[in-house]
C-alpha cells in the first residue's frame, strides 16, 4: 500500500509541476506555431500514457496485493486484450508522429518569396552574409578565409562580389518576411537556434544546410549554438534584430560588400607613423607602453585586433562604462582617426619590435598552467593569438594590464555593451577564474611565454602537460 501511495503522489506532483512550472517555451516570435502545437500534443499523449500506466500499476498493487489464501492463475494469452493494447498503442504512436510529419513537410518547403541570409559557424562565433543586387549568395570555402576575407567567399565567383559581409555576430531581419538561412561551418558541427523562432538546423563543415522561418515580432533575440562544439560552446551567441522593412533596408545600405572589402588598400606604415604621433604621449614612440600612465604595450597585437579596439572605443562599445576610467581616456584619441587612419596606425605598430614586458605579477605558475588550458583554445597554447576566433596575442603583453582587463570582464566593466559582441564572450569565459588569486595565477603563467608575432598565428594545439 505504501508503494501505491508513493506512486500516486509522484504522479500528482508531476502533473501539478507541469502546469505550475515557471519554465516554459520562450515567447513565440515566428510563424512556427505548428512546432509549439506538436510539442503540446507530445506532452498530452505522453502525459496520458504516463498517468494511465501509473494508474494501472497502482490498481495492480492494490487489487493483487499479497493474500496467503489466494493463488495466482496463469493466463499465457489473451487475444482480446492484445488487440486492445495494439490498437491503443497504434493510435498513440500516430498521434505523436503525424503532427511532426505534417510540420516537417512545411519546414522543408521554402516559400518562393523567401530572401536568403548566409550563416557561417566557427568556434566560437557566428558570421553572416547577405546577397547583393543579384539576389544570390556566392560560393564560400574555408581555404579562402583570411583577415581580408573572413567569410571565405570565393573571389572568382561573380555572385559573391556584391555579397554583404557581416564579420560580427549580428543579424538583421525584416519582420513578417520569410527568410531562408543557408548555413555552413568551417570547423566542427554547429547548430543555429533562436529559441523564440523555434526552428533550428545544424551547420556542417564542407556542406550547405538550410531552414526557413518568418519573424513575426520586432525586437532583439539571442541565438545560441544548440550543438556541443567545444569548450566555448556556451558562449557562442549572436544577436538577431528583427526590424521594420525600412530600417532593415537602411541597415543593409550601410554594410560593406565583398568587392569593397577586397578593394581596401592595406594599411600604410609610413602614413601611420605620423598618425601615431598623438599616441606616443602615453604608449611611447615604440608602443612599448607606460604603466605609470596606465598605457599598455601595443606591439605584438595584430592589425585586425588594433583596428577593432579603436572602432570599439570610437563607437562607445568600449570605454563608456563609468568604472573604466582609463578606457574613457582612449575615446577622444580614437575619434581622431578615420577608418583608413586606423589601418595605417595599426600597420605602423606591426612594424615595431616587441620586447617582453618585465613581470610584475606574482602567482602560482603550475596552477596557472592548468587554468590556462581553457584560454588556450582561443588564444593558443603559447598565447600567440588566433584571428580566426578573434583572440589577440597574449604573450609579451603587460601582465598588470592583463590582470585589469580580466577583472573588468569578470565584473562586467568591459564586454557588456551590446556592440562589443566578442567582449561578451570573454565575460562568460572569465567567470571560471573564480577569484583574484586565479587571475594572478593564469597571468603569471602567461608571463612564461616568449613574445612572438601574432599576424600569422593560427595554431589550434592545446598544451595538456601537467
Image (spheres, rainbow, N blue to C red):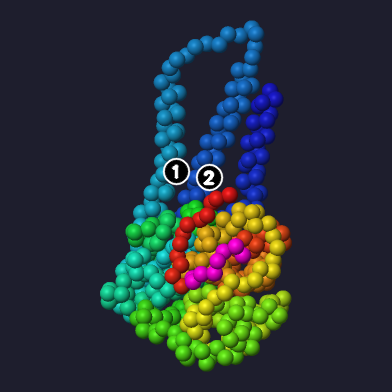
Residue beneath disc 1: 96
With respect to residue 428, does 67 lie above or below? above
Residue 330 picture location, percent across and down: 63, 83
Residue at left 44%, top 19%?
Answer: 78
Viewer-proximal residue among 209 and 294: 294
From the top left corner, tell me how far across and down residue 225 is, in percent: 49, 58
Residue 288: x and y, percent?
Answer: 60, 79
Task: Give 106 or 150, whichever is nearer the viewer.
Answer: 150
Specify start and end residues of the magenta stretch as a single range: 447-454
Q: Nearer the viewer, residue 257 or 298?
A: 298
Q: Is residue 404 left or right of residue 226?
A: right
* Residues at discs 2 and 1 in contact (Cβ within 8 Å): no
Q: Which mark is residue 43?
A: 2
User: Which one is earlier in the sequence, the residue at label 2 or at label 1?
Assistant: 2
Figure label count: 2
Q: Is residue 448 magenta?
A: yes
- Placement of the N terminus among the 4 image quadrants: top right
- Dot 1 falls on a residue whose secondary structure is helix
Q: Residues within 10 Å of mark 1 (few under 14, many from 20)?
A: some
Amino acid at each position: 500500500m505504501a508503494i501505491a501511495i508513493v506512486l500516486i503522489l509522484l504522479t500528482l506532483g508531476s502533473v501539478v509541476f507541469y502546469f505550475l512550472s515557471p519554465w516554459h517555451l520562450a515567447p513565440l516570435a515566428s510563424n512556427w506555431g505548428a512546432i509549439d502545437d506538436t510539442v503540446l500534443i507530445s506532452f498530452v499523449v505522453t502525459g496520458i500514457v504516463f498517468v494511465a500506466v501509473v494508474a494501472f500499476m497502482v490498481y495492480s498493487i492494490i487489487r493483487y496485493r499479497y493474500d496467503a489464501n489466494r493463488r495466482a492463475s496463469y493466463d499465457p494469452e489473451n487475444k482480446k486484450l492484445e488487440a486492445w493494447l495494439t490498437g491503443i498503442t497504434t493510435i498513440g504512436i500516430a498521434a505523436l508522429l503525424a503532427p511532426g510529419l505534417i510540420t516537417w513537410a512545411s519546414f522543408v518547403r521554402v516559400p518562393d518569396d523567401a530572401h536568403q541570409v548566409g550563416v557561417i559557424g566557427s568556434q566560437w562565433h557566428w558570421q553572416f552574409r547577405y546577397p547583393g543586387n543579384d539576389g544570390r549568395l556566392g560560393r564560400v570555402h574555408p581555404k579562402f578565409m583570411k583577415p581580408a576575407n573572413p567569410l571565405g567567399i570565393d573571389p572568382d565567383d561573380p555572385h559573391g562580389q556584391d555579397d554583404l559581409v557581416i564579420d560580427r555576430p549580428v543579424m538583421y531581419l525584416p519582420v513578417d518576411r520569410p527568410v531562408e538561412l543557408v548555413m555552413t561551418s568551417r570547423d566542427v558541427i554547429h547548430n543555429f537556434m533562436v529559441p523564440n523562432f523555434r526552428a533550428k538546423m545544424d551547420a556542417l563543415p564542407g556542406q550547405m544546410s538550410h531552414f526557413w522561418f518568418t519573424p513575426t515580432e520586432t525586437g532583439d533575440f539571442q541565438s545560441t549554438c544548440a550543438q556541443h562544439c567545444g569548450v566555448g560552446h556556451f558562449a557562442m551567441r549572436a544577436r538577431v534584430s528583427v526590424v521594420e522593412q525600412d530600417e532593415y533596408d537602411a541597415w543593409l545600405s550601410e554594410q560593406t560588400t565583398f568587392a569593397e572589402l577586397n578593394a581596401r588598400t592595406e594599411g600604410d606604415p609610413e602614413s601611420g607613423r605620423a598618425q601615431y604621433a598623438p599616441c606616443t604621449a602615453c604608449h611611447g614612440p615604440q608602443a612599448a607602453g607606460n604603466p605609470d600612465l596606465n598605457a599598455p604595450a601595443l606591439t605584438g597585437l595584430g592589425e585586425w585586433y588594433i583596428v577593432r579596439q579603436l572602432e570599439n572605443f570610437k563607437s562607445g562599445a568600449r570605454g563608456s562604462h563609468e568604472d573604466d576610467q582609463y578606457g574613457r581616456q582612449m575615446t577622444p584619441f580614437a575619434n581622431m582617426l578615420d577608418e583608413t587612419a586606423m589601418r595605417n596606425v595599426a600597420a605602423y605598430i606591426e612594424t615595431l619590435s616587441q620586447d617582453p614586458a618585465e613581470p610584475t605579477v606574482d602567482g602560482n605558475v603550475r596552477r596557472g598552467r592548468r587554468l590556462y588550458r581553457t584560454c588556450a583554445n582561443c588564444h593558443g597554447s603559447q598565447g600567440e593569438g588566433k584571428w580566426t576566433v578573434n583572440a589577440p596575442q597574449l604573450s609579451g603583453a603587460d601582465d598588470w594590464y592583463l590582470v585589469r582587463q580580466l577583472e573588468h570582464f569578470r565584473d562586467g566593466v568591459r564586454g557588456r555593451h551590446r556592440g562589443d559582441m566578442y567582449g561578451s564572450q570573454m565575460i562568460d569565459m572569465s567567470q571560471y577564474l573564480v577569484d583574484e588569486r586565479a587571475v594572478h595565477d593564469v597571468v603569471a603563467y602567461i608571463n612564461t611565454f616568449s613574445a612572438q608575432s601574432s599576424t600569422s598565428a593560427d595554431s589550434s594545439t592545446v598544451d595538456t602537460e601537467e
